[in-house]
Amino acid sequence: MFVLVNLKAYSGEPVPVAEAARAVSEATGVRIAVAPQTAHLERVAATGVETWAQHVSSVEPGSHTGATLAESVAEAGATGTLLNHSERRLTLADLDTAVGAARDADLETVVCANTPAQVAATAALGPDAAAIEPPELIGSGTPVSRADPEVVTEAVEAAGAIEESGPIEGSVPVLCGAGISTGEDLVAARDLGATGVLLASGVAKADDPAAALSALVDPIT
Amino acid sequence: MFVLVNLKAYSGEPVPVAEAARAVSEATGVRIAVAPQTAHLERVAATGVETWAQHVSSVEPGSHTGATLAESVAEAGATGTLLNHSERRLTLADLDTAVGAARDADLETVVCANTPAQVAATAALGPDAAAIEPPELIGSGTPVSRADPEVVTEAVEAAGAIEESGPIEGSVPVLCGAGISTGEDLVAARDLGATGVLLASGVAKADDPAAALSALVDPIT
Amino acid sequence: MFVLVNLKAYSGEPVPVAEAARAVSEATGVRIAVAPQTAHLERVAATGVETWAQHVSSVEPGSHTGATLAESVAEAGATGTLLNHSERRLTLADLDTAVGAARDADLETVVCANTPAQVAATAALGPDAAAIEPPELIGSGTPVSRADPEVVTEAVEAAGAIEESGPIEGSVPVLCGAGISTGEDLVAARDLGATGVLLASGVAKADDPAAALSALVDPIT
Amino acid sequence: MFVLVNLKAYSGEPVPVAEAARAVSEATGVRIAVAPQTAHLERVAATGVETWAQHVSSVEPGSHTGATLAESVAEAGATGTLLNHSERRLTLADLDTAVGAARDADLETVVCANTPAQVAATAALGPDAAAIEPPELIGSGTPVSRADPEVVTEAVEAAGAIEESGPIEGSVPVLCGAGISTGEDLVAARDLGATGVLLASGVAKADDPAAALSALVDPIT
């Protein structure tokens, strides 16, 4: 299972969370990455943790003031990026271009989606994985794996609904977001077919991020 | 073949084009629809031509000042709507919701896409059809069927790449946009697998729209 | 006082509200206008009520699928338009262009703003009026004139803070939005310096819109 | 005069330009700052050059994936930020909030505007300065000070058109963007009343950025 901790635009220093994530990952062998704000990428990457961007722009290098180039976040130490998070939606055309820009910069991609149909749509764009996050559950404290387990299994099915032949590539792995906070949630997500989870405040705002992460991955280690 | 004439935000009275479209459609039996600006829907529908919206919003009825409700364009006489035109992009999540809102209002949907991968993505959302319009050819005068025929056949293939089983529905028809203006272009689009074409200025700005439409559909009647 | 009833994207037929507004305006001499959805402009204008658009685009006529041209809403019968409503924000540059496009189409303009500073900013663009609507009060049922009367007087002051000399024009009238529903609110707004009010659900969703409007304007007639 | 070099989303390493800017600034006493991409802020600030962000978001810390918090760019070493660049427009409401967020994070602000009316509007929001950049001249190689000197003097006048009394603060300095590349342009901008200039490719893409900057500031040193 892949655990991706989204630090969103939370206030405060990202390095302690990053160090906790690296330490728990090393101790348990579970893959754990941290996605800080763009301005914090360098200092987070310097901790040695697997570092992700929260977003990259769909543009090529050029006259795009305020854009977040895939190649620049890669230079700052990121090895992957979220795309199309519910707090940072992209048009379909820009999402397609951003997946390509990330790939060209050797960034792994996880594209967020609200519904199984949107998971199928994102799968058609060839990302490395999709994440299913029903918006009504984000920040709810109720894991999607308990509130609506069918949406996870349908998302996993949808991610594999693109035919292997033709111009479009095959099935993509599905991560499970929205409301994940405990080891039980992690196991439930895995049992429904997810290959990872997205988390945010449960780890990022924990008094002891290392303890929170250790408890999370304990049932699978 | 379905011929959909997009009047965009061109200046001038839409009724003469609408009447020309209705007359040529009646005379030839070819399905021809006209998509005027929202403020012109009532007067265009009053001509008896098949009337489409250029866009509908992704929102439910409620506090959304300036939105274009699917049910309101239907009340004004539209029976279909374009969605995600390159001049009016939607986020993937909004596109999904807008396709559903249009369906609930009994509007037929054609979702525009730049690339075969985006056609596959839109097909996953269950519209009535997709339209392939490589942006570099829009308004170029060069038909996609001549400039890049493979993109049309790949789009048709991509639109059928969603498996029949599972939560997602099967193949959707593909319309061909960008640069279509002559009967020869129409035939070429059909021969590449398209079931219709999108046009704009070639008809909407013609001195004699009826003559332009008659010449367009002549080879298939 | 000017009473502008925003029908937003509410469900249902706009004509009864339009007829009520015209009747109450004629009976009382109070200026009352109705702003329906774009697709409903023609049928609302046909009632003889003063008809406003909820939004116009910042673009010139041309290739802008899904845009709402100022000249097209004028052709459909509108004589004014809201701009920059909190549910339909514009960039500063687009707002500037949209005010100009509306002026060129002989549409009166009311530009919405959240704060006195934003009222001063919009006044610099030369609209016919500004409307102050603190977002936290929209739909709250609490009128801004009671919850925060200073914001109205500061907005009126701010709207006059642009110097008469130089390239920028002088003071603009200020309308009061957000939470207005009774005659008492209307009088309070007037006494704070506002020259009109924006309303929405209080009239648009009333069982008897004519009775709601009559009660509203009663204290000033 | 203040010289602000916008590195936009140009490809390549920003440190050499930053070091050139710091060296020329130290040698000449002219204030020169560099605005790199967000991901590059830390390494640029580490050179000792005055470092600016190209954009900050209008949001408070919280659940805003992909946002660029003012406080985070300040932590990364920025002491100022551009806002509302023509390549990164903000709604009027968001611009108002972003100016406040930047001020709270002790970032100096320069707000871009297309026209004198927009300069007056931005001045009402209380930034530290406005920048006038007629969009048709951006990247044209023709300086606004030569192509349209009146627009600069009108912008300077407009920036002072907000009355000193009332809730709104007084005049703000005006920078001159669009097409500036030579020392002659810099002097012309100063003579028209500008207190600084915005530059981009002329320095950022120069073979020898230090030489380009030295030539630029030579006439005023």
Image: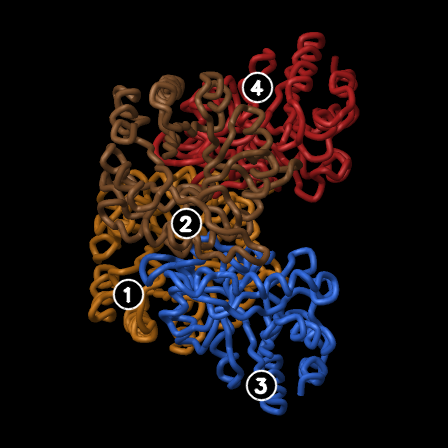
Chain colours: A orange, B red, C brown, D blue
Estimate the x, y position of residue C31 in percent, counting from the top left. 40, 28
Q: Nearer the viewer, residue A96 or A69?
A: A69
Residue type, label 3: Arg
Q: Return the residue at label 4.
A: B51
Residue A4 visible to the viewer: no
Mark-to-mark CA distance, 3 and 2: 42 Å
Binning the other alpha carbons within 10 Å of mark 4 as few (below 14), some (14 to 19) or many (20 upward) gives: many
The three-letter amino acid code for the residue at tag 2 is Cys
For the residues tagged 4 and 3, is the chain the same? no
Extreme residue toward the bottom, this view: D27
Q: Is residue D150 left or right of residue C7?
A: right
Q: Report the chain holding disc 1.
A: A
Task: Kindly identify the residue that appears in the image at 64 percent across and 15 percent down.
Answer: B31
Query: Are the two marked residues, 2 and 1, in contact with CB atoms closer than 8 angstroms?
Result: no
Q: Amino acid at mark 4?
A: Thr
Could you tell me which chain the residue with mark 4 belongs to? Answer: B
Mark seen at residue C111? none
The residue that disc 1 covers is: A204
Q: Chain of mark 2?
A: A
Task: Please check whether the numbered discs 3 and 1 fall on a single chain.
Answer: no
Tell me if residue D35 can be seen. Answer: yes
- Marks 4,1: beta carbons within 8 A: no
Q: Are marks 4 and 3 in contact (CB under 8 Å)?
A: no
Instruction: Give the residue furthest to the top.
Output: B27
User: Where, by quadrant of the figure, is residue C206 drawn?
Assistant: top left
Which dot, 3 or 2, sits closer to the camera?
3
Between marks 4 and 2, how big is the CA–CA gap? 35 Å
**Which of the two residues, A221 or B51, is positioned nearer the viewer here?**
B51
Mark 1: amino acid: Ala
Chain letter belonging to callout 3:
D
